Image (cartoon, grey):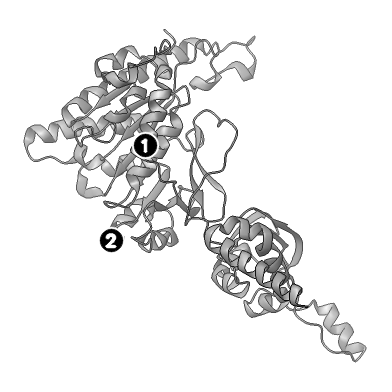
Amino acid sequence: MDALWITLLVVLALALVLRWRRPTWYWMTFGITFATIRILTRYRAVMDACGLTVPPARWRLALARATNRPAPEDRSPRILRLRPTATGLVLRLKLRPGQDAFDFTAASDRLRHSFALHNVVAREIRSGVVELRMTGYDVLKRVRLPAAAPSEVLRVPVALREDGEVHHRDYRQVPHALNIGATQSGKSVYQRTLVSRLASQNVARVGIDCKNGVEFFPLSARFTALADNPDDAVGLLAALVAYMGRTYELIRAEQRISVAVPDAEITADIWDLPAHLRPVPVVLLVDEVAELALAASKSEEARRDQIVTHLVRLGQLGRAAGIYLEICGQRFGSELGKGITMLRAQLTGRTAHRVNDETSANMAFGDISPDAVLAAVQIDKDRPGTAVAGDSSGGWSRIRAPHTTLRQAVDACNAHAYRTPSIPELAPFRPELPARVLIGKVQPKAAQAPAF
């Protein structure tokens, strides 16, 4: 008997230590079992308390009256599947007639408390089927992106979502994005993670960093072009627009629209061109858009108008030419001047880190989702890197990027410096490679963009 008590104490102590130090291990060893039992035993009572049941069918009520039996109970959604994951549980439900997926979204907080889980997110899988993704612990407390297979071109993992899934930045699906956040909100770390993850892909990166280059120039080994002030940014954007025009000329020449050409070979963008003719895709990163849009004199106003015009043109026409925008800033409102809201309308993806006021959150999500605005305002200042990510469809989720140090980002860019392509229009803005990158090793020949 004493041995049994000692064993139970050891197991209890192990569970407490794992829950404190290794929540993932605790969840996989103990948490899944406890949570599954809670859900299955409380399911009917929780559905009834949360208002997620429907009255019995009329024929069942009539049959109960005819046979003098008690009236049947209200019906809960039918459980289709309960699947454990490394971070929680996935509960798939078949809705009853009259129920809607929004009912479960509105009741997500009540379900979270009732099942004693950390978070519950509801989403519709198909008509009549809802999936509840439940996390058993705070997955955003210590963010570690899982080791994965090589990422697809222009699709990189950058953060972890609150439901335990990996959040990807997919430029092919969401070409242009806006990233806002206050000082010390983790916006620069998110951007640094994105830059380091793109380093291993065959893409050209173009940067505009008006903070005298302190964010991007340490990573210059992997940049095709860089500008560190608004005057250089005007020339760089004009050169990028010229490159876009040359790319469209190539697409026009290679469309080959005739009766003999199969439909699959007709193209209106670079991705259907033959591989040997396809220009290298370009990702333009702007670190602080307000520095490009602010003007204090007539000459600066003229420069600002040129910059905004070029950015709007790239936002409207750049996708087919393989040019993608990643615009960052603390604020992105109409006070930045004429044309800035037109640019914002082109930015489908939206990411908001901690902001200092609701107005800043409205600049990102006000035209998309009021719930996302509220979630962005509620981000805790003691948890930098936490953000709300959404798009123009209205969907959103909380995410948090792993803490990527500047040294880690520099090492990633230096290791893949040989992948940096050369583009003739952008050659005058090519940053000078730091001497330390060449010490002790010979870099392979740089990848070249196809000549056309």
Residue sitting at x 48%, y 53%: 142
Residue sitting at x 65%, y 15%: 262
Callout 2 crowding tier (Cα within 10 Å): few <14, some 14–19, many ≥20: few
- Does the CB distance between marks 2 and 1 fall below 8 Å? no
Camera-side residue of 403 and 4: 4
The furthest residue to the bottom? 68
Callout 1 crowding tier (Cα within 10 Å): few <14, some 14–19, many ≥20: many
Callout 1 secondary element: strand
- What x and y, as percent, mark residue 431? 27, 20
Could you tell me which quadrant the N terminus lies in?
A: bottom right
* Residue 100 placement: quadrant: bottom right
Q: Amino acid at mark 1?
A: Glu
Whichever of labels 2 and 1 marks the residue nearer the N terminus, that label is: 1
Residue sitting at x 57%, y 73%: 113
* Residue 418 placement: quadrant: top left
Camera-side residue of 25 and 285: 25
- What x and y, as percent, mark residue 263? 63, 19
Residue sitting at x 53%, y 59%: 21
The furthest residue to the right? 67
The reply, left or right, for residue 186 in relation to residue 388 is left
Q: Which residue is mark 2?
A: 357
- What x and y, as percent, mark residue 16? 58, 67
Q: Is the residue 134 above or below the residue 154 in the image? A: below
Would you say residue 342 is visible in this rendering? yes
User: How many labels were placed on the picture?
Assistant: 2
Q: Amino acid at mark 2?
A: Asp
The furthest residue to the left? 297
Q: Which residue is mark 1?
A: 326
